[in-house]
Image: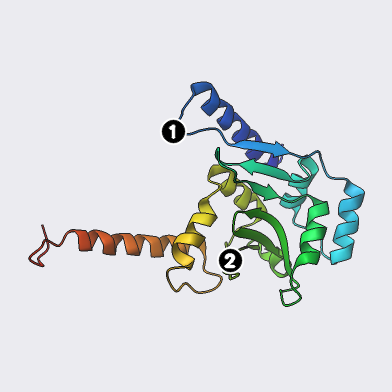
Amino acid sequence: MNEIERILNSFRQEQIKIANQNLHANKPITLYSNPPVNEEYLLKFQEDIQTKLPSDYIDFLKINDGAVLYPDNKNTQLDIFSVYLLVYEKDMLPTSSSLSLLPFARYQTTTFYMDLSKLQSRKYIVFSSSTGHHYDAHMCFKNWLQTILSNPKYFNSYASKFFHSHTVPYYASIQELVEISQAFEIDRNKCSSINFNGHYNF
C-alpha cells in the first residue's frame, strides 16, 4: 500500500466512523471518485507538457482519475480534476499566466496548481484566491491531499480571511499565515482586555 492509498483508506474509515456514530457536529464528507486513469492518455499528457508529473499525484490518478469532494450539505464542492480536465484547464489559462502552473483542483474561489518548475523541491503546490494572486503552500500533492481531506475549507478560509484584508507577501507559506493569524488573535485579545477607562484588566 502506497502513501496515497493509505491516506484515502484512512479518510474513508474516518467518514464511516463518523456516519456510524451519527456525530451531527461532524457530518461525514462525501467523496465521489472516478475510475483509474487511462495510462496511455496520462503518458500522452505528460509528453504534451514535456514534464513527468509527481509520483504521488500519479499514484492518486492510478486510483482515481479525478474526484469530487462534498464537504457539507451546501451546494459546494471541491473538484480534483481528471486528466481530461487537466488538458482543458491548462488550455483555458490566460496567455499572461505562468507557463509552469498546472491547475489540478478547485474549491469555490480557490484554485490549486502544481508549479511544474518546482517539482524537484517537493514543495510545488500553489493556490490562488479570488483576486487572482498566487501563494505557495509549501506542500507536495500527498501533503495537500491529506490536508484537504481533513479540512476542505483550510486554504479557502485563509484566503478569504487574510489575503483580502491584510497585506500578505505573494507566495506566503501556510506557516507564515498561521503566525499572522496568531498575531491578530493576540491583538484582538489585548484590545478586549481594556476597560472603559482605557486601562488594562489584570
Circle nearer the viewer, 1 or 2 = 1
**Residue 54 relative to residue 143: left or right:** right
Give the mark nearer the N terminus: 1 vs 2.
1
Q: What residue type is labelled 1?
A: Ala
**Residue at (58%, 66%) from the top-left corner?**
136
**Residue at (68%, 49%) from the top-left corner?**
79
**Residue at (58%, 27%) from the top-left corner?**
16
Q: Residues within 10 Å of mark 2 (few under 14, many from 20)?
A: many
Name of the residue lying farthest toward the bottom = 96
What x and y, as percent, mark residue 2? 71, 41
Quarter of the picture holding the N terminus: top right
116 versus 108 height, above or below: below
**Residue at (55%, 37%) from the top-left corner?**
73
According to the image, label 1 marks what residue? 25
| Residue 51 quadrant | bottom right
What x and y, as percent, mark residue 200? 12, 63
* Cα–Cα span, label 1 and label 2: 32 Å
Per the rendering, the mark at residue 150 is none
Q: Which amino acid does label 2 sit on?
A: Asp
What x and y, as percent, mark residue 63? 77, 40
According to the image, label 2 marks what residue? 136
